[in-house]
Amino acid sequence: MNKTNKALMGTLIGIAAVYAGFSFVLTMLNIYDNDGTALRIVICPFEPFNGWTMPDFIHDAYWGLIGLYGSAGVDGEKSLLTILFAVGFALVAAGCLSKPTWDLRGKEDDPQEYLFTHRPMAFFWCLMIPWNILTAAWGLKKIPVIIPIIFIPFMLPFALIIDMFLAVTYIIAWAVMSARISLLASKDRDTYDKDTQYAVCPKCKRNFYQPYVKCRCGLVMSYPTPNKYGLKYHTCNQGHTIPSINTDGARGRLQAVCPYCKGEMFTHEAKPLVISMVGSVGSGKTTLMISAVESLTALAKEKGVVSEIITGGISVAAQRGKANVTPTQAGELDSEYFFLRSRELPEKEIVINDISGVEFQPDRDKVLFEEYYRYNDGIIFTVDPLEIMALHYSQSPTKGSKNTPVAIMESFYHMYTEINGYGPAVKSTVPFAVVLTKMDDPKVRASVDAAGSPAEFLNKYSHKAIADIAENAFKHVRYFKVASIGDNNNAAEPFIWILGENDQELREKLFK
Ligand SMILES: Nc1nc2c(ncn2[C@@H]2O[C@H](COP(=O)(O)OP(=O)(O)OP(=O)(O)O)[C@@H](O)[C@H]2O)c(=O)[nH]1
Ligand SMILES: [Mg+2]
Ligand SMILES: [Zn+2]
Ligand SMILES: [Zn+2]
């Protein structure tokens, strides 16, 4: 039971209980002091003070039901009445304290506690509170429900008093809580829409507004925001507290769960920027990525921005071994991601999709690309100049092979335009970097420099098709010459361009 609920229910039930107790005392006084007429006070304890009398039909029906009207003159009957009302009062009190009253647990598909004022049919359940001994007995089976049913006439006056007060205080509490929820929720949504916008799953690549979250007890529930489950905190069905606003980034640090593939992830409520690597086997995608992350984190540090690397593929250990990366496994599809944050900058998440060059070969099953290329903030197409030159000079049949850079480019182009539904005349506005890799190799550098620009190099060595397709499909194409290994590596350049094109805040803070 969370604090807000304790406070709400404590106050509401407390107020009602005070008046029910008052009614009980008056009832007792009336049984002993009076001549029958004052028994009406059982229902309305204020009757003697304001002169108002109970309508006769209620009065008669009530005492008709009890069958004791007017017969309480004898001492023995007085004691019997006292006992019966005392039991009735005790049953009402037990109902208020029973489990059904305090059980606000959410349903299995979203196992978190509701706010007392906002659970389904909250008003009905609120009015049920003094009657909950019936609900409890019904559920228990051991105590036959018939026992409290027999006592309903003696519970009625106190239950009605309690309901009357609960109804009034509930409506006030509901209005106050609703107003606070909508105020907090709209503030929360505005911040989220500005700083985060959406989340992306590093496993299945789908994107969504907000993920699910997993409590430390393992319960998975909807993303906590100010709503029917609570204002600034929610409580899981097991009683653990989780933040539902992102003060100090606490909510962003919760273990998130992808609503589609159920994979675990972190979002930090950072705005995701997704960059995809494309290129033939061995063209240098993985090396470029690792080297770029290393440079970007160093650059960030210089500018007072903290980077937090989440996945192993770009970890410091991976950075150390970057000169000897092994070919990425076909079928290895998890994205790498890291976060950048500083005082002045809303946190950013950089997601890099680096898959095996084998995946792009035209004969591969392309189902996985359905989601892969729907959300991209930039694409990096790596070209190994040595491979280009080898193909140019080669007379072997590999020239017509399906695994050449041009075949990969064509295959990528078809997937990309099909998935995004682009016609031949439509150009994507996603930044597209064509990157000549391995520029630290003196042979490579000499040949590329001799040709002039990267585009001229591609042209000279019979690979103009790569540039043509890129510029046909993308509005913003830029060429890079990159060394990913060596002291003077410049692997971060295409990343800096793409990130800067997408995010003005990053550009100003990091890349100016
Ligand atoms: N000298 C030098 N070698 C590089 C550079 N980039 C990559 N290599 C080497 O080229 C080979 C292939 O690099 P990877 O990064 O594995 O290429 P990939 O595109 O990820 O390949 P797949 O994962 O198999 O698709 C490795 O032996 C790298 O060390 C570079 O900038 N300079
Ligand atoms: Mg690789
Ligand atoms: Zn997923
Ligand atoms: Zn929990």
Image (tube, rainbow, N blue to C red):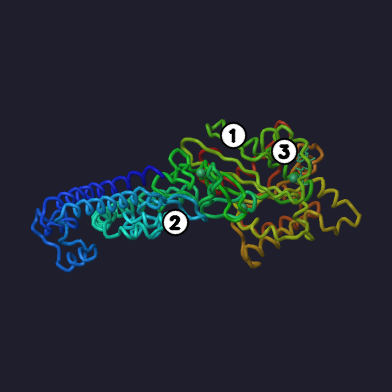
Mark 1 Cα within 10 Å, few/some/many (few <14, many 20+)?
A: some
x, y (%) of residue 314? Answer: 67, 39
Residue visible at 54% across and 55% down? 208
The numbered disc on residue 139 is 2
Quadrant of image for the N terminus: top left
x, y (%) of residue 8? Answer: 32, 47
Name the secondary structure under disc 2: helix
Residue visible at 52% across and 31% down? 304
Q: Nearer the viewer, mark 2 or mark 3?
A: 2
Q: Nearer the viewer, residue 288 or 91?
A: 91
**Image side of residue 194 versus residue 101, left or right:** right
Question: Which numbered disc, 1 or 3, marks the residue that appears first in the sequence?
Answer: 1
Residue highlighted by disc 3:
484
| CB at disc 1 and ligand 1 closer than 8 Å | no
x, y (%) of residue 45? Answer: 16, 53
Q: Is residue 41 visible?
A: yes
Name the secondary structure under disc 1: helix
Structural distance between the alpha carbons of marks 2 and 3: 68 Å
**Image side of residue 452 versus residue 177, left or right:** right
Q: Nearer the viewer, residue 340 or 256?
A: 256
Give residue 440's quadrant in the image. Answer: top right
Quadrant of image for the C terminus: top right
